[in-house]
Image (cartoon, helix red, strand yellow):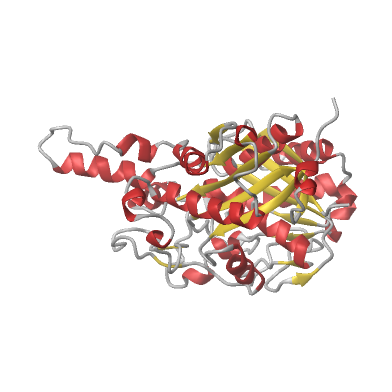
Amino acid sequence: MELKRVVVTGLGALTPIGNTKEEYWEGLISGKSGAAPITYYDTEKFKTKFACELKNFNVTDFIDRKEARKMDKFAQYAMVAADEAIADSKLDLDKVNKLRVGVIWGAGIGGLETFQQEVLNFAAGDGTPRFNPFFIPKMIADIAPGNISIKHGFMGPNYTTVSACASSANAIFDALNSIRLGHTDIVVTGGSEAAVTIAGMGGFNAMHALSTRNESPETASRPFDATRDGFVLGEGAGALVLEEYEHAKARGAKIYAECVGGGLSSDAHHMTAPHPEGIGVIAVMKNCLENAGLRPEDVDHINTHGTSTPLGDVAELKAISEVFGSHAKNININSTKSMTGHLLGAAGAIEAISVILAMEHGIVPPTINHTTVDENIDPELNLTLNKAQKRDVKVAMSNTFGFGGHNACVLFKKLD
């Protein structure tokens, strides 16, 4: 069976450094940090008092107030990013066969704030179970693609992938395969997360996963730096419209890039820690290259998972050196989490958008906040430190890994 070609025809981004794909890109290439003191709740007793929240975002600018109240933040963010991507694709929704348009979305946690609030309300009461009738539909992770499909009438496959921080990269790969195999013509894909809550921050603090650089939040996310002390939690959403190539060509669509492959693997090692030798990461990048029919030396740019944790950053770079050999030093490697923080289930989507825009503009965004060399990292690797670099990017890879050992990787290529 000959696989169909798949291209990207729409993008949407709602991030801590920009509320549209254009603002997001400007934030990336300028090296903007999205980290700041948390405004959502009183952080006095919390170890970490900062995060990468959305800025100047009012959901009622996009969604009717009554409808917005029926959605958790993660679902609101999904709707906003998906609407931008659909508009960007210039699809004529009156002409497409909606039975062949799917929505495959990623979320690592889902409606955490809704769950938190309902449980707190119950605990504060007299024991009578008075729960909001929207509690369950607001909380469940699959409601985001459900809402997108309901709004637009998309009747193709509709579900959420949940693989922790690999969720939205997982969703993109599933969307790619759905179109490749001829099941759909178009899939709206991506991911969203809204975990900057007392439960989210408290839980990650209890694991010692978060940076506690409270005196300087904007420099706290520092992938590959010797003084890194954990990740910075972020929130938001990223959306991509994937489309079968001939379908896109027939309607004269703008094509950003071709989605040429993906890979999945498991570390099979530890609940939260990466394998120290990056065995699962080596496997997922090899799987991705093989799936795309490309060689290691074809890759120009890798947006790493690069969360700014002591163990994870080193393991990933070791894996890159193993897979790419001597070519690794020719690749522009970066971590945009240095600017956006870690968006958990939305990370794969916004980072895929970053590599696609790097291809379009010929610029690789920087890894900011690097001040101290880590002797465990190969000094010959180009980590695109502190300043964006011009580069003709023809092939780009995006890596995302999640608790539980989930690894996902997607590859994009300039259209031939």
Q: Residue at x 29, y 63 (%)?
A: 44
> Left of 248 or right of it: where is 91?
left
The location of residue 248, given as percent across then percent down, is 75, 47
For the question of whether residue 404 can be seen, the reply is yes
> Left of 387 or right of it: where is 109?
left
Quick one: 218 or 161, which is closer to the camera?
A: 161
Q: Residue at x 41, y 36 (%)?
A: 140
Q: Is residue 289 above or below residue 86?
A: above
Residue at the extreme top: 1
For the question of whether residue 48 can be seen, the reply is no
Q: Residue at x 63, y 61 (%)?
A: 336
The location of residue 326, given as percent across then percent down, is 89, 53
The location of residue 316, given as percent across then percent down, is 70, 49
Numbered marks: total: 0
Quick one: 54 or 183, which is closer to the camera?
A: 183
Quarter of the picture containing the N terminus is top right
Residue at the extreme front: 94
Q: Residue at x 13, y 41 (%)?
A: 125
**In the rendered image, which quarter is residue 17 located in?**
bottom right
Q: Is residue 298 above or below residue 142?
A: below
The location of residue 132, given as percent across then percent down, is 24, 39
